[in-house]
Image (tube, rainbow, N blue to C red):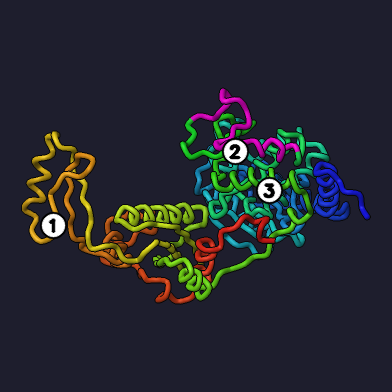
Amino acid sequence: MRERLSPTQEAERVEARVRTRLEPERELLAHLAEVRAELVRAVGQAARDRKSPLVRALIAGSAARGTFLKDRLDIDLFMLFPPGLSREELSRHGLELAEAVLTAPERRYADHPYLRGTFRGFTVDAVPGYAVTDPSQPLSPVDRTPFHDEYLRTHETPAIVADVRVAKQFLRCLGVYGSEARTQGFSGYLVELLVLHSKGFRALLGEARGWRIPARIRPAAEDPPRLPEEVALILADPVDPHRNVASALSRRNLALFILASDAYLAEPSEAWFRPPPERVLTRAEALTRMGERGTEVTVLELPRPSLVDDTLFPQIRKAQRTLAEEVGRAGFTVLGSASAAGPRGVVVVLEVASGVLPAVRIQDGPPVGLDRVGSFLEKWTHSGERVLQGPYVDEEGRLAVETRRPERSLVGTIRTLLPRLSLGKNLTPGSHSLPPIRLLADQADSPELDRALTELFAKRLPWHRR
């Protein structure tokens, strides 16, 4: 019978096993180094052949530093051009060079176009940028990357590199690894800086369990300027103090990490480093849960605009937030909302306590004694059949009147609200083309609907799903 270990001893045992499992084989690292060097040489040769104004090409990111997870190994190739080049010329030259060296190139879009293809069996993202000399004055979002790479190479030790991989796997299994707008989680660069700052994975968790949101890693005097009110985590970029490295991280995802840090340290096990089983709720299952809860769910369908995810998902979240707020203002008790996007469409789902409002609506007026009393009385004394009762003075000494609601159903209310709502620049429908709005029972099945319903009805801490 194995001797019972303390949580600290158990954590040491668990993390040693996870480090070994995540460590890349020496053969892979040697092969990767050869491919990186060959790729840089190939780009340089392609630039010379085409008389391209390329300043230099380099490999940066986790593939360059060994901080990658083996099943997420992509190579990030950066092609840097003179700052005087226009954005159009930057894209043209960068794409030409990438097309010359990559197999099966596919054009992708972020701040500006880049190519994804393969080279010697590895997936490569080839991104053009500017060869700036001051990372605090970037001309494109990727211009700081060479400085990030140099900073981390200078400061990271082999032990830190190994712990970075452990931290990434921990965050990945929580579903909060990745800074893209769809995820709103921890970027790879942020993970490396946090592990470096704390001098290890478990030390980072020990600090994180005591964080309060917004969490501050360094003294407030070192805060970047112009932080938004909803900021979750504050960590100035060491190569550009004006930038918050954690700007993409949501408060929800940081809170999940804080809670998980405390739970892991109390009961460490290798299960924390295995993704929980993925469970998608079907429409039929959601209808059953809705019946058990005694609630109503409505579905808003919107066409998917031709946008990259990092542009689209903030708009989807705005549409979800706006719809929930306005339905709440209309008198419904909103219990939850969710959204999802598929190749062809976007869905927003909304759960309310009841799908039908009472016929009566109380209109609060001003306190007695204010100048506005006269206008309130004038308005409602002559309003005809819409007034069910009043005007009268309520228990708080305010005027009030009870009126008949023009629309009582959830679907009808949303149809009335939509023409005046701003759901997002590319999602707001035209006034003459309202999108479909249906109760869940009347909605057709779709993968994006299932994902939204899972988010709405299957909320559970990731480590409780194992």
Q: Give me the C-alpha separation between circle 3 and circle 1.
A: 81 Å
Residue type highlighted by circle 1: Val
Q: Residue at x 93, y 55 (%)?
A: 1
Against 115, is 59 above or below?
above
Q: Quickly name the residue at label 1.
A: 387
Q: Quadrant of the C terminus?
A: bottom right
Q: Nearer the viewer, residue 11 or 223?
A: 11
Direction right: furthest residue: 1
Residue type highlighted by circle 3: Arg
Q: Give me the C-alpha separation between circle 1 and circle 2.
A: 56 Å
User: Within the magenta stretch, is there residue 295?
Assistant: no
Q: Position of residue 414 (x, y in %)?
A: 31, 62
Among the 4 quarters of the image, the one containing residue 116:
bottom right
Q: Quickly name the residue at label 3.
A: 48
Residue type highlighted by circle 2: Val
Q: Nearer the viewer, residue 226 or 81?
A: 226
Q: Nearer the viewer, mark 3 or mark 1?
A: 1
Against 183, is 80 above or below?
above
Q: Residue at x 13, y 52 (%)?
A: 390
Direction top: furthest residue: 221
Among the 4 quarters of the image, the one containing residue 150:
top right
Give the crowd class for mark 2: few <14, some 14-19, many >=20 residues within 10 Å.
many
Q: Are marks 1 and 2 in contact (CB under 8 Å)?
A: no
Q: Are marks 2 and 3 in contact (CB under 8 Å)?
A: no
Q: Position of residue 85 (x, y in %)?
A: 53, 41
The answer to whether residue 135 of the structure is visible from this angle is: no
Q: Quickly name the residue at label 2.
A: 245
Q: Position of residue 265 (x, y in %)?
A: 74, 44
Q: Residue at x 8, y 58 (%)?
A: 384
Q: Nearer the viewer, mark 1 or mark 2?
A: 1
Magenta-tinted stretch: 203-225
**Which of the two discs, 2 and 3, labels the residue nearer the N terminus?**
3
